[in-house]
Amino acid sequence: MRRIILGLFTLLAASSLSAQSKTSIPLCQAPFERLLGPAFFNRYPAKPVRLSKPATPVVSKGQAHLFRTVIREQAKMGPDFAGHFTIVRIGCGAGMVCLAIADALTGRVFFSPKLRNVFIFRDANVERLNYRRDSRLLIVAGSPNEDVSREGLSYYLWQDDKFHLIRFISSAELCKN
């Protein structure tokens, strides 16, 4: 009985120390409000298109077929990016989001090789995908395509149905004290 009580005490003490160490890790104090602010989005305007109903996504082949249910559900909500596109967030593991882009005018679905998925920004409390309907800019906070050497803020411009990296700020640079 003594061993059981001692074991439980040790387990509780260890979990308490673990919880304390997790909360004592400082979060990145970068000026995210400014780095994700409207000034950046306003530089790359897109004219929102008025639609009575978004086009049904074409999900008959490839990756689009694999994720057809989530693509259809999110595309129904209508455009939320670059005028007439919808960013589709696909859960693809703990701490990670995969994405597709659905065109509300044509129904075409895009998967970008430059941005297949985004792993969470470890030491920051910030949204991974930042975008607006009236802008062609997508700001990613985290590690694109699980590449930890690319952890930070990546600024992508949506042009010609592709993402083009236009700026990158590493987490080391962002979070230095």
Image (cartoon, rainbow, N blue to C red):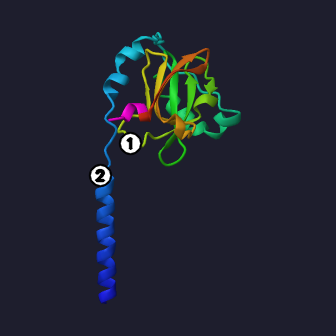
| 24 on left or right of 66 | left
| 50 on left or right of 35 | right
Residue 103 within the segment the image draws in magenta: no
- Name the element at disc 2: helix
Which residue is painted at 43% across and 35% down in the image?
Answer: 172
What's the amino acid at mark 1?
A: Asp
Which residue is painted at 30% across and 63% down in the image?
Answer: 17
Q: Quadrant of residue 70?
A: top right
Residue at the disc numbered 2: 23
Prevailing secondary structure class for the magenta stretch in the rendered image:
helix
Quadrant where the N terminus sits is bottom left
Quadrant where the C terminus sits is top left
Residue at the disc numbered 1: 123
Residue sitting at the far right: 61
Q: Quadrant of residue 34?
A: top left
Quick one: 6 or 176, which is closer to the camera? 176
Quick one: 31 or 138, which is closer to the camera? 31
Q: CA distance from mark 2 to mark 1?
A: 11 Å
Closer to the N terminus: mark 2 or mark 1?
Answer: 2
Quick one: 128 or 171, which is closer to the camera? 171
**What segment is highlighted magenta in the picture?**
173-177
Residue 42 position within the rendered picture, expressed as x and y whole percent measured from the top left: 40, 12
Check the image and report above or below for 19 versus 73. below
Residue sitting at the far bottom: 1
- Name the element at disc 1: loop
What's the amino acid at mark 2?
A: Thr
Tell me if residue 60 can be seen.
Answer: yes
